[in-house]
Image (cartoon, rainbow, N blue to C red):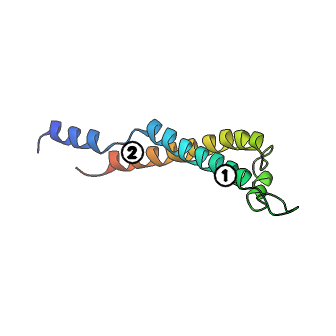
Amino acid sequence: MTESDAELRTAIRRLNARAWGLAGGLVLAFGLFLATNILLLEGAPNGAEVGPTLGLLRYFLPGYSVSFGGSLIGFVYMFVIGYALGRTVGTVYNKLVDGAPS
């Protein structure tokens, strides 16, 4: 195998860390946005709190609540968290690929 073949294999195996970050961010952000708004549309039984379990996220995401405004705040938080996780996965994978034998 020539050197150019090895470089081509490494280039093909590498991930786009930014794309992984965007994908992870959008998946988590839309997931929380949809979960919150579906709960709001379904409503709660007579006098009960809407989404008490999902509402526990307010301890980890300041400003989040089970409301439409809270779903927008949660969207931003989860996009940032998902972007960081996806970018980290892509970066670590690329480091491993760069060090792997061809």
Vertically, is 18 above or below 64? Answer: above
How many numbered discs, if any?
2
Where disc 2 sits, the SS reads helix
Residue in the image at 49% along x and 42% along y: 23
Q: Residue furthest left?
A: 1
User: Does residue 101 appear to the left or right of 86 in the view shown?
Assistant: left
In the picture, measured across the screen, residue 94 lies left or right of residue 77, that is: left
In percent of width and height, residue 51 lies at 76, 59
Q: Quadrant of residue 50?
A: bottom right
Q: Give whichever of 54, 39 is nearer the camera.
A: 39
Q: CA distance from mark 1 to mark 2?
A: 37 Å
Disc 1: CA contacts within 10 A as few (<14), some (14-19) or many (>=20): few
Q: Nearer the viewer, residue 41 or 68?
A: 41
User: Which is nearer the eye, 63 or 41?
Assistant: 41
Which percent across, then down, holds residue 30? Answer: 59, 45
The residue located at (39%, 45%) in the rendering is 94
Q: Amino acid at mark 1?
A: Ile
Circle 2 residue: 94
Give the SS element for disc 1.
helix
Q: What amino acid is labelled 2 in the image? A: Asn
Q: Position of residue 3 (x, y in %)?
A: 16, 38
Q: Earlier in the sequence, mark 1 or mark 2?
A: 1
- What residue is disc 1 on? 38
Q: Establish if 39 lies above or below 23.
A: below
Q: Residue at x 56, y 42 (%)?
A: 25
Report the mark closest to the observer, 1 or 2.
1
Task: Place residue 14 in its image quadrant.
Answer: top left
The reply to whether callout 1 and callout 2 are in contact (CB within 8 Å) is: no
